[in-house]
Image (cartoon, coloured by chain):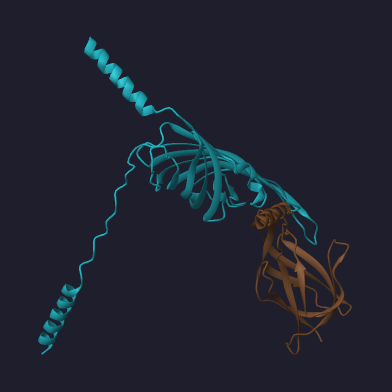
Chain colours: A brown, B cyan
């Protein structure tokens, strides 16, 4: 009888627990840094900020890669400082709304069409995977001048 | 030589087959309770439907009523109908779905009655369920570095249907009063593709994303002790007598 009462208590507590709902996933564009002359992966002191946004995505951190959040419009523009030299990058993409679940919500996925950029520190950019999904993987190779 | 060996092996096989003892025929005793146990119609109410939010994600509640009668010995045609509501309100989604549903089917009682008064049943049954429902995402929110995005999806109406396999008991606790539980395995047959957002909730079935749902119900019943067979029989006799008198 005692065990049965314990079971009832546990079940009541479990039922009374507040449900936890996860936030929706995010699809982010991943850029990996490469040395333009050796073609090997390299790190760089990075600061990146979206055009029209007050706060940066990354503030002075040494990184091998970066994850860029994209807008729901067709273009997303960033100013990026690589070892204190600034460049602008514009991503041209298609945006598609996706459904995760009704508990979690909705998110956006993207298809990268092209990338425009200035060449102060950036040498070239190569699109490796144009689909930007919630499974983050390398989307572009960003070749930096040594 | 080949023909000889073939004939030899064939005759050996035949001998083995004949040598096997004849399998005993399974004797299945006939039911001794091939009579109507419960006269009249039994009406029921599912007491678990208003409290579904305790074991499902989101705020789900509803009501369900049923009616069944023993039309043939141990066979109970069933009609069930109800109304189901599902609401989810999180930081990211405000969803509401609701609709009325119905099920028709039949139960077969496996429990052999010992006496005429014994009305308890252990049954298996099948159901066909259908619903006309609607859903609406009143608001959704997507957090982003570029600022939070909000939006909504208007009212979506849809039809869905499913099949159920049920297993349960109904026991008479007082005269004409019954209680019982049912385990239900529900298989989705089809539903309309709404694209965005897809059907999340099917009243009477559960989550629309799943092809199979398991459910548990507990109901209370009252059997209206009106034996329609007797009344039909009596009226026929009365009519026959009147004809004879004339």
Placement of B206 over or under B13, stated as above or below: above
- Between B142 and B230, which is closer to the camera in this rendering? B230
Viewport quadrant of the N terminus of chain B: bottom left
Left or right, B93 with reference to B207: right
Query: How far across and down, in percent of the image, does residue A59 sit?
Result: 87, 72
Q: Quadrant of residue B156?
A: top right
Placement of A90 over or under A120, stated as above or below: above
Left or right, A63 with reference to B13: right
Q: Which residue is drawn at 49% across and 33% down?
A: B175
> In this orientation, does residue A98 appear?
no
Q: How many marks?
A: 0
Placement of A31 over or under A18, stated as above or below: below
Placement of B174 over or under B97, stated as above or below: above
Left or right, B183 with reference to A2: left
Left or right, A2 with reference to B47: right
- Between B203 and B200, which is closer to the camera in this rendering? B203
Task: Give the farthest residue toward the top.
Answer: B246
Viewport quadrant of the C terminus of chain B: top left
Query: How far across and down, in percent of the image, does residue A106 sit?
Result: 68, 56
- Between B101 and B156, which is closer to the camera in this rendering? B101
> In this orientation, does residue B6 appear?
yes
- Between B124 and B209, which is closer to the camera in this rendering? B124
Query: How far across and down, in percent of the image, does residue B65 sit?
Result: 53, 37
Query: How far across and down, in percent of the image, does residue B73 sit?
Result: 35, 40
């Amino acid at each position: 009888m005692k065990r049965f009462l314990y079971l009832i208590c546990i079940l009541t507590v479990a039922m009374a627990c507040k449900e936890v709902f996860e936030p929706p996933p995010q699809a982010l564009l991943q850029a990996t840094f490469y040395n333009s002359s050796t073609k090997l992966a390299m790190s760089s002191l990075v600061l990146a900020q979206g055009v029209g946004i007050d706060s940066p995505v990354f503030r002075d951190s040494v990184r091998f890669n970066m994850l860029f959040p994209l807008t729901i419009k067709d273009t997303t523009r960033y100013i990026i400082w690589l070892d204190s030299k600034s460049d602008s990058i514009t991503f041209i993409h298609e945006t598609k709304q996706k459904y995760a679940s009704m508990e979690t919500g909705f998110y956006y996925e993207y298809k990268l069409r092209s990338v425009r950029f200035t060449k102060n520190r950036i040498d070239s950019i190569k699109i490796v995977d144009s689909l930007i999904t919630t499974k983050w993987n390398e989307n572009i190779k960003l070749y930096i001048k040594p | 030589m080949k023909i000889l060996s073939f004939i030899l092996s064939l005759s050996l096989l035949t001998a083995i087959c004949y040598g096997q003892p004849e399998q005993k025929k399974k004797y299945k005793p006939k039911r001794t309770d091939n009579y109507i146990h419960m006269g009249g119609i039994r009406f029921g109410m599912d007491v678990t439907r208003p409290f579904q939010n305790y074991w499902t994600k989101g705020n789900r509640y509803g009501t369900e009523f049923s009616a069944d009668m023993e039309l043939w010995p141990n066979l109970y045609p069933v009609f069930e109908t109800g109304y189901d509501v599902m609401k989810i309100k999180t930081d990211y989604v405000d969803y509401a779905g609701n609709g009325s549903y119905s099920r028709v089917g039949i139960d077969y009682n496996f429990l052999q009655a010992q006496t005429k008064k014994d009305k308890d049943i252990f049954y298996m049954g099948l159901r066909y369920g259908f619903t006309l429902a609607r859903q609406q995402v009143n608001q959704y929110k997507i957090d982003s570095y570029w600022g939070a995005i909000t939006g909504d999806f208007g009212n979506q109406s849809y039809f869905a249907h499913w099949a159920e396999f049920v297993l349960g008991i109904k026991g008479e606790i007082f005269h004409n009063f019954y209680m019982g539980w049912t385990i239900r395995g529900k298989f989705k047959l089809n539903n309309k593709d709404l694209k965005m957002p897809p059907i999340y909730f099917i009243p009477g079935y559960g989550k629309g994303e799943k092809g199979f749902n398991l459910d548990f119900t507990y109901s209370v019943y009252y059997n209206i002790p009106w034996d329609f067979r007797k009344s039909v029989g009596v009226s026929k006799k009365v009519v026959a007598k009147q004809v004879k008198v004339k």
